[in-house]
Image (tube, rainbow, N blue to C red):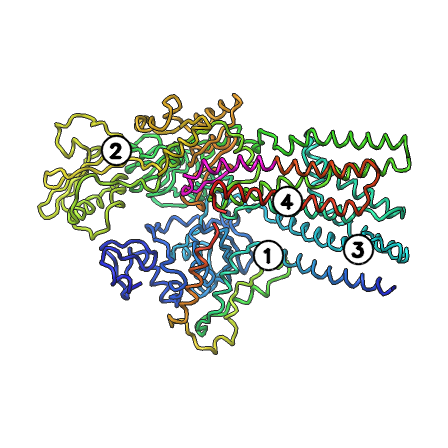
């Protein structure tokens, strides 16, 4: 790194720790450049403790150190109540806890965290789960939880602890149970096949009957766990389906398994045949594989977050000039809270002291922060930008403006899909048809040859209820889900593909969805020399106004100059002097004097800069729209009606009119307005695809048929939704939707193929010729055909649409 | 021919052994994380100067059975480099050249990390 630094001119020095550009003000230590004190400190800590390998495993692996939190912030970790809820296990000697650490991003992170015991005696073990961005720590009780969290924070891995983490751990056991089922089904299937071999080859004619009886009983024994344990999901699902008066696909599958088992058991116990246990075990095994294939989950993603994932665990309460950290649920009305820069306001409140600048982008989607005057109301969910403020609580957290959205009906119950999936629609006709064929065939043979009537009846049921149909969906859509995942479009489950394919109206949010939140930096219109940049940067450094901070972040890093006689004129601008150079920054009238005509038709906020009375230009805070927006809209417009709904004011209406039909632009919409707008469309029979990002869209995303949440970093928070789209793949959206549609067509073809097999096998069954050997050939063959078709066809489709595979 | 009875039972028992091994693997959490161990195993090839390093607290192993039942993942993450043998080997972690290939491999690995 040091070499790289010397090879390039000083403008391209990157931080040894975090790899960010240092600008010209790099801090040097041991010939290594650092961008800030925070990064340097971490390097020092690690270097002193023999952790220099951290920098060898991956280049510049560190995390940019943000402003240090004051010591009081973490004191909530000393509340025994909070601790008890956070830890996995605790006894008198040790504590075990699992932290979510979103900063984990490379091999160095894993190495450092897992070697943490060398940094701090008392930590016994750390185990990182990279994909889940989790670290499981065990430490002896000589250490407090708080000291461990502080240690992690000091090296840049501050765990994410929010209100949601107090709600207890999510289920883990369920997926383990599934693996047991899969393993046991596979084991039984293999062995039953082996034991059925003599039957297939009709060896039993040559061997003693004692053998075939022995084989049969072994088969029966092996089939018991398959029937009673491995297929329990299908029986439960079929029962709950029937109770809800729905003939979903699980009903014929469960019926098939049941008939297979009871007929085989009967045949073996009465010694009238060898039974179909091989087919039954095979069916269950394939079904479970299909389920496993379909349930591709994204470990690090969460699709059902609500406001609790955004809210902190604790707040700082002022008590007789002391600052006490209290859990959020202990906040009472008229408490006085201290909110520091970057902290979230946990409950509706009024401002008592300090300069309030609220960033409400979570709540309203409005991107510019709002200035709050003393005595004015602040809504929960706002983020303070600037100095610390004091507020008095007016409402409880759960009754606040933002959180009330979650009391709406849509969130109350488990969101029921408003459409029946294709396979279940199909099954509604298929199941009665299958039953009537079975009854008709049975009745016919009852007249002709009553001895095989029962045989034919059960054979027909076995044939038609077989697996190929049930396998089509998991393999076709499961593969489509994977392909979409590779293209940075992460779906909650396969049913989202179906709802996506049915879309007939698309609604966009604006801020954060069509605009790029990260690129929302000030950019200067005009020319500035490096020394002028230095002056401007030094000036804005003194101001805590959010716009000043944006300017500060966007200017090239330089050394700060001592500014004299700095003055801030509220609502106008700032000025300061350095070596007889007077620098002014602010509104047009403030900088240019009072003779400026009002409003030069600005689409966004501008800050003008003048040095020694000479106007140099202005900083533009326009929203940065995503690249390729035009093409995406145009592409989608061909097939869908497109609307835009935003919490922002009409400031950019003119610009947006070039993309959208004016009638479909909706401004100044509150989160609840958005929800009811979508609800209105849905009630008129539309299938709405809502694309949003922030919490303010949460209601709309939930209400829509398909809710897609766009995010710059998929491991970051996103509100509850059906799918998460990486912002990088925004351009691909029309392609992705087209792929989803195509996959549904392929699914129909796959269903057709399995139906053909059914008809073919049925011709054996109705004639009473459905022997175990026919079953043993036909059932695996149909399963494999359907599976192969589902996977191959979706992969080909992706290739044709030019998606990554 | 009657040896078949014995052989079949034996074969079933062998197969059962594999099934038990599979179930044990699930129980011990080997399927919980199928990615991190692939990186972790590359670290453990490296040897550190363990003289000043305190041994991990024993109490993890000495905990009661009840506690053992409670835990879901084994503490296999305690690096094997803690063995007394490794302290006899001179530390070479300071030498950059020795580590570079490892760093290279890891960098390649990082680029293939699925999200």
Q: Earlier in the sequence, mark 4 or mark 3?
A: 3
Q: Residue at x 41, y 35 (%)?
A: A347
Q: Which residues are magenta?
A: A723-747
Task: Compute the Cα span from label 4 to label 3.
Answer: 26 Å
Q: Are marks 4 and 2 on the same chain?
A: yes
Residue denoted by label 3: A195
- Residue at mark 4: chain: A
- Mark 1 and 2 residues: CB-CB less than 8 Å, in contact? no
- Is A710 rendered above or below residue A433? below
Element class at badge 1? loop
State how many labels appear.
Answer: 4
Task: Compute the Cα span from label 1 to label 3.
Answer: 33 Å
Element class at badge 4? helix
Residue B66: give x, y in percent of width and height: 64, 58
Task: Compute the Cα span from label 1 to label 4.
Answer: 30 Å
- Mark 2 and 3 residues: CB-CB less than 8 Å, in contact? no
Of labels 2 and 3, the one closer to you: 3
- Residue at mark 2: chain: A
Q: Which mark is residue A605?
A: 2
Residue A321: give x, y in percent of width and height: 33, 44
Mark 3: few, some, or many residues within 10 Å (few <14, many ≥20)? Answer: many
Q: Which mark is residue A787?
A: 4
Q: Earlier in the sequence, mark 4 or mark 2?
A: 2
Residue denoted by label 1: B29
- Residue at mark 3: chain: A
- Is A191 rendered above or below residue A720? below
Q: Residue at x 23, y 42 (%)?
A: A543
Mark 2: few, some, or many residues within 10 Å (few <14, many ≥20)? Answer: some
Q: Is residue A334 visible?
A: no
Compare residues B43 and A438 and report the one nearer the observer.
Answer: A438
């Amino acid at each position: 790194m040091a070499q790289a630094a010397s090879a390039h001119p000083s403008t391209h020095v990157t931080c040894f720790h975090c790899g960010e550009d240092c600008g010209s003000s790099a801090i040097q230590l041991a010939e290594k450049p650092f961008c800030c004190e925070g990064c340097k400190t971490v390097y020092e800590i690690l270097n002193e403790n023999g952790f220099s390998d951290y920098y060898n495993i991956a280049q510049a692996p560190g995390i940019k150190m943000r402003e240090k939190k004051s010591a009081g912030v973490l004191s909530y970790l000393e509340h025994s109540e909070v601790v008890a809820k956070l830890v996995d296990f605790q006894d008198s000697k040790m504590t075990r806890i699992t932290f979510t650490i979103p900063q984990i991003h490379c091999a160095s992170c894993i190495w450092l965290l897992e070697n943490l015991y060398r940094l701090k005696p008392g930590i016994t073990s750390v185990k990182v789960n990279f994909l889940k961005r989790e670290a499981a720590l065990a430490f002896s009780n000589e250490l407090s939880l708080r000291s461990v969290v502080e240690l992690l924070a000091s090296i840049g891995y501050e765990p994410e602890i929010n209100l949601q983490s107090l709600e207890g751990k999510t289920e883990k056991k369920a997926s383990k149970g599934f693996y047991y089922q899969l393993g046991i089904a596979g084991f039984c299937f293999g062995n039953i096949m082996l034991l059925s071999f003599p039957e297939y080859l009709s060896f039993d004619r040559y061997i003693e009957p004692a053998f075939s009886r022995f084989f049969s009983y072994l088969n029966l024994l092996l089939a018991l766990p398959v029937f009673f344990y491995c297929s329990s999901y299908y029986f439960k699902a079929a029962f709950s389906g029937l109770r809800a008066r729905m003939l979903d696909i699980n009903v014929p599958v469960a019926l098939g398994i049941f008939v297979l088992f009871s007929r085989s058991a009967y045949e073996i116990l009465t010694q009238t045949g060898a039974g179909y246990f091989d087919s039954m075990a095979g069916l269950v095994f394939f079904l479970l594989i299909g389920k496993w294939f379909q349930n591709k989950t994204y470990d690090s993603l969460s699709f059902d977050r609500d406001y609790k994932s955004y809210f902190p665990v604790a707040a700082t309460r002022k008590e007789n000039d002391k600052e006490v950290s209290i859990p959020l649920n202990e906040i009472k009305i008229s408490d006085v809270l201290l909110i520091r820069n970057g902290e979230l306001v946990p409950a509706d409140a009024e401002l008592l002291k300090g300069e309030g600048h609220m960033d409400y982008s979570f709540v309203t989607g409005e991107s510019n922060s709002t200035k709050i005057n003393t005595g004015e109301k602040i809504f929960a969910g706002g983020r303070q930008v600037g100095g610390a403020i004091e507020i008095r609580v007016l409402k409880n957290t759960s009754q606040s403006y933002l959180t009330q959205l979650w009391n709406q009906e849509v969130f109350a119950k488990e969101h029921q899909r408003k459409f029946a999936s294709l396979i279940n629609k199909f099954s509604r006709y298929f199941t009665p048809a299958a039953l009537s064929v079975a009854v008709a065939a049975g009745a016919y043979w009852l007249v002709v040859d009553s001895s095989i009537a029962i045989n034919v009846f059960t054979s027909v049921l076995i044939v038609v209820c077989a697996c190929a149909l049930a396998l089509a969906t998991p393999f076709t859509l499961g593969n489509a889900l994977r392909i979409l995942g590779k293209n940075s479009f992460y779906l909650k489950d396969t049913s989202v593909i179906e709802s996506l394919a049915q879309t007939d109206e698309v609604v966009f949010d604006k801020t954060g969805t069509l605009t790029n939140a990260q690129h929302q930096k000030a950019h200067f219109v005009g020319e500035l020399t490096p020394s002028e940049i230095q002056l401007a940067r030094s000036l804005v450094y003194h101001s805590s106004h959010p716009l000043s901070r944006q300017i500060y972040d966007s200017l090239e890093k330089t050394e700060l100059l001592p500014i004299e006689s700095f003055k801030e004129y509220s609502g106008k601008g700032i000025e300061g002097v350095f070596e007889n150079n007077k620098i002014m920054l602010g509104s047009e009238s403030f900088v240019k004097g009072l003779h400026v005509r009002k409003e030069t038709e600005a689409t966004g906020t501008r800050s003008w800069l003048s040095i020694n009375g000479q106007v140099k230009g202005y900083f533009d805070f326009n929203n940065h729209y995503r690249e390729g927006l035009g093409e995406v809209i145009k592409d989608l417009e061909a097939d869908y009606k497109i609307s835009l709904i935003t919490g922002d004011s009409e400031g950019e209406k003119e610009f947006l009119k070039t993309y959208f039909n004016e009638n479909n632009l909706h401004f100044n919409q509150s989160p609840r307005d958005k929800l009811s707008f979508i609800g209105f469309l849905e009630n008129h029979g539309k299938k709405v695809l809502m694309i949003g990002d922030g919490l303010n869209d949460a209601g709309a995303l939930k209400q829509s048929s398909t809710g897609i949440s766009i995010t710059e970093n998929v491991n970051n928070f996103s509100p509850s939704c059906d799918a998460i789209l990486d912002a990088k793949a925004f351009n691909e959206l029309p392609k992705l939707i087209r792929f989803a549609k195509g996959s549904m067509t392929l699914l129909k073809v796959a269903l057709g193929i399995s139906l053909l097999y059914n008809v073919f096998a049925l011709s054996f069954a109705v004639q009473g010729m459905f022997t175990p050997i026919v079953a043993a050939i036909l059932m695996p063959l149909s399963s494999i055909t359907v599976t192969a078709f589902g996977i191959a066809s979706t992969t080909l489709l992706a290739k044709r649409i030019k998606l990554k595979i | 021919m009657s040896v078949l009875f014995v052989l079949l039972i034996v074969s079933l028992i062998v197969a059962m052994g594999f099934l038990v091994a599979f179930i044990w693997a699930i129980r011990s959490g080997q399927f919980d994380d199928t990615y991190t161990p692939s990186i972790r195993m590359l670290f453990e090839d490296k040897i550190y100067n363990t003289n000043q390093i305190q041994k991990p607290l024993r109490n993890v192993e000495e905990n009661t059975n009840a506690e053992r039942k409670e835990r879901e993942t084994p503490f296999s993450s305690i690096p094997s480099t803690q063995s007394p043998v490794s302290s006899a080997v001179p530390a070479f972690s300071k030498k950059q050249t020795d580590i570079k290939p490892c760093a290279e491999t890891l960098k390649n690995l990082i680029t293939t990390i699925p999200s």
